Amino acid sequence: MALDLFKRVETRKGLFAVEKITLIYNLLTSILILFLFQRMDHPWHMLLDRAMIAAMTFLLMYLYRLAPCKFSAFVRIVIQMSLLSYWYPDTFEFNRFFPNLDHVFATAEQFIFNGQPAIWFCHTFPHLIVSEAFNMGYFFYYPMMLIVALFYFIYKFEWFEKMSFVLVTSFFIYYLIYIFVPVAGPQFYFPAIGIDNVSKGIFPAIGDYFNHNQELLPGPGYQHGFFYSLVEGSQQVGERPTAAFPSSHVGISTILMIMAWRGSKKLFACLIPFYMLLCGATVYIQAHYVIDAIVGFFSAFLLYVVVTWMFKKWFAQPMFK
């Protein structure tokens, strides 16, 4: 199949949909920085980062005019998708000032399940095969995005811009929730209150504890496994006490599965085992409460419908004439 990656094409001027939504999120969080300016650790640095991201976006738009083709369009969109790794920990810079809500979610979990499934799950199945399977599933999160994105780019290019917009906008909606609903998850909250309190079902409010403390509970399971080490290493580097409710791992991967189903049933069938392991892993490695995973699953369908409507209503324009 000829991709014609570098064949020059007639293209519309201006920003792609995914670039527009990134700039909107950039502006909204910049305004929030100004409101919280006196309380933030490095507001000028954060504002500079946002200015640089905006400048890079417009620079890529103008450079694209020199060689408009599928490949240069792909580069523009993938760069915006890669910036999600910046925007995710950035949510912590905002929600660290708000009272933590883990005690509410842990108490609800205790009431519903008469205990903490995040503790039971990993303690019941500490074995190498189970641990490695779930850690592999959890680590597959970003490869899954890449696989679905490449599939649409290669086989469904006419839907590629829509796919990238739905994915990135869904992330941004989750990120806005994380800013104003500060839940860190068991791997941060349980060390903060002590395992004795967890075992007794006592879940005290800890206020802005995570503003000054970011102790991360070591991952459970078989600690000498290959995928265990990959997940543990990535969490120690990039994880923050934020983004637990709802689980974006479950929500975004569910949206990816919807996209896979709509694009190719074979692709969907290939991804479904990894998807199921990923969803289970969110609780197994104690990154989330079961409540987070459940809401993440159901919110994905709502987000897919709403964001698709947004694209069609306000952003839908073909990349190429």
Image (cartoon, grey):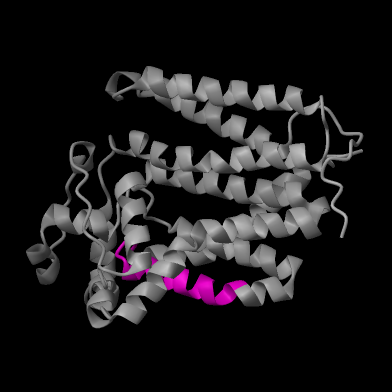
Q: Which residue is drawn at 74% across and 46% down?
A: 161
Residue 143 figure quarter: bottom right
Question: x, y (%) of residue 122?
Answer: 27, 75
Question: x, y (%) of residue 6?
Answer: 83, 40
Q: Is residue 61 above or below residue 257?
A: above
Whether residue 81 is visible: yes
Q: Which of 51 and 3 is in front in this view?
A: 3
Q: Is residue 274 inside the magenta stretch?
A: yes
Whether residue 240 is visible: no
Q: Main secondary structure of the magenta part?
A: helix
Q: Is residue 26 above or below residue 258?
A: above
Which quarter of the rendering shows the C terminus?
A: top right
Residue 114 figure quarter: bottom left
Which quarter of the rendering shows the N terminus?
A: bottom right
Residue 231 figure quarter: bottom left
Question: On the picture, is 134 further left or further right than 22?
Answer: left
Q: In this view, does 165 lie above or below 232?
A: above
Question: On the picture, is 320 further left or further right than 298?
Answer: right
Please, which residue is most extreme toward the left here? Answer: 196
Q: Tell me the magenta residue range.
A: 271-288
Q: Nearer the viewer, residue 206 or 232?
A: 232
Question: x, y (%) of residue 150?
Answer: 69, 55
Q: Which residue is drawn at 74% across and 70% down?
A: 264
Question: On the picture, is 266 further left or further right than 253?
Answer: right
Q: Is residue 276 inside the magenta stretch?
A: yes
Question: x, y (%) of residue 276?
Answer: 49, 75
Q: Which residue is drawn at 75% across and 66% down?
A: 263
